[in-house]
Amino acid sequence: MSPKPSSEPGVVVIGAGQAGVHVADALREGGYHGAVTIVGDEPGVPYERPPLSKGFLVGTTAPESLRLRDPEHFMKRRIKLRIGVAARRVDTVGRTVALADGMRLGYDHLVLATGAAPRGLPIPGSDLTGVCCLRTVADARWLRERMRSARSVVIVGGGFIGMEIAATTRGRGPHTTVLEAADRPLERALSPTMARHLVEAHRRSGVDVRLGERVTGLVGERGHVTGVVGASGHTYPADLVVVAIGVSPRAELAEAAGVRVADGILVDGSLRTTVPEIFAVGDCARHPNVHAGAMVRIESVQNATDQARHVADTILGTVDEPYARLPWFWSHQGELRLQIAGLRGPDEYDVVLGAPESGRFSVCGYRDGRLVAVETLNRPADHQAARRLLQAGVSPDPALLSDHAFDLKDFAKREVPSADRVPRPLPTREEHS
Amino acid sequence: MPEIVFHQPGGRVATVETEAGVSVMRAAVQNAVEGIVGECGGQAMCATCHVLVHESVLDGLPPIGDDEEEMLDCTAAPRDPRRSRLGCQLIMGTDLPKVAVDVPETQL
């Protein structure tokens, strides 16, 4: 990429989360000389969200450690931050973005990293005081404050976020109930074995997990929530209700600009939208995923950062292949440290490694005789091994796994030669004094 | 202020000053030091903040915990029996005011 005077438009990134910040950094790391601007509607320095439902809620994560980058970092890299201002309109013909403060930014390439917004409960009472969602640091601060005085917390939704919040509230005073509409939580994302284990572990630690309980209403007094009504007819007392029933992609800006949208901003294998100069990455992008064999939207840090890098490389012209990184996730629910490599489908054949009752085990999911996903609980070495195998497309025979001596880590080391992973030996250098 | 010197495989050197209580991984990520990923957020769960600590500062380091030990066996670049550590487990402060590390060629 040849140097450009900074008066030229360059790249505008809308969204200052993991995906947006990574696009800007990857452009600079790749030698992009043009203007790079990040527009974000939340105030403050860009931050990471995963700790908001974990350490930040219990106060073990300090606000400064949430920052994705030091504030000076953006200046040093000539990345302009337009923070606390929303993008209002994209003109795809004139290639400009109009901001809420009246400013207009020109672009050569536009990257939409607009993320997702929590879904609300479409039922009566969801506007009562004491009912909240968790997405932003402002939400997390509010929730943390409320948790201190709350007596009964009801979490609606037994997904990752709901269970992570439950793990922080229980044992800290409030009685905690999780209401999940499905008969098992994370039905599509987790094996029955792992889902069952997590539910039982939460129950043992004092969380009242109710499965198959759809929420039909919220009741309150003088504007404040007092209870959650389930389809069973039971009313669960609550002075704090956290709605964690998933998110919707923020695709309104794209849609209004004429970019094709269908539960997310539609992109091709290069993460390009139906408008050639516009890309979409992260939570908001519905992309063809080789590991899923389908168009999917993935909400994870890995997906955000890997897609960001891919788009930066595409803009830099250093990549031709379609995006193909292996999806992986993690969810820390108290002592339960869950990691998932790969994507599960509906009909996996599962083989369990290790003893679930020990609290450390892995579930290997097979589809058509091939390993497609591995869930590990408190077994990080298995997770790393699984990622190496899945990314390389190496599948251990399921029969091998039933041998008690089988070790996924050893297998991965043997079958995915380290030569693939270590391109060059480290050069020797003088010691720093 | 505590100071961390990162030596990149190509020979480039980045010096980062940080607050006490901040890990080598966190300081690297916030300053976008290339080659330090820290994808698990500092839980010793991912081994993407693998660093090779310079010999001269090895004595000042905290001992390797069980989680770190397990993850050091899964680093993408080969483990060095003496110098390999996870950056998330090295907390800067009065016990560790200054450290110099090599960033490995690969983390993933």
Image (cartoon, coloured by chain):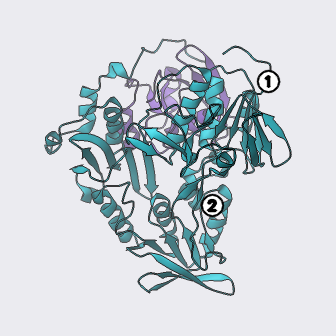
How far across and down, in percent of the image, does residue A262 sit?
54, 50
Looking at the image, residue A148 lies above or below residue A301: below
- Label 2 is found on which chain of the structure? A
The verdict on a common chain for dots 1 and 2 is yes
What secondary structure is marked by label 2?
Answer: helix
Real-space CA distance between mark 1 and mark 2, rounded to the nearest whole angstrom: 39 Å
How far across and down, in percent of the image, does residue B58 sit?
49, 27
As rendered, which of A135 and A171 lies closer to the eye? A135
What mark, if any, has residue A8 been given in the picture? 1
The N terminus of chain A, quarter of image: top right
Is residue A74 rendered to the left or right of residue A244?
right
How far across and down, in percent of the image, does residue A239 sit?
59, 79
- Label 1 is found on which chain of the structure? A
As rendered, which of B58 and B33 lies closer to the eye? B33
Is residue B91 rendered to the left or right of residue A333?
right
Chain B appears what colour?
purple
Label 2: how many residues lie within 10 Å, few (<14), some (14-19) or many (20+)?
many
**Which image quarter: residue A110?**
top right
Identify which amino acid the numbered label 2 is placed on.
Ala
What secondary structure is marked by label 1?
Answer: loop
Where is mark 2, residue-wise?
A140
- Mark 1 vs mark 2, foreground winner is 1
Chain A appears what colour?
cyan
Q: Are marks 1 and 2 in contact (CB under 8 Å)?
A: no
First in residue order: circle 1 vs circle 2: 1
From this viewpoint, is residue B72 visible? yes
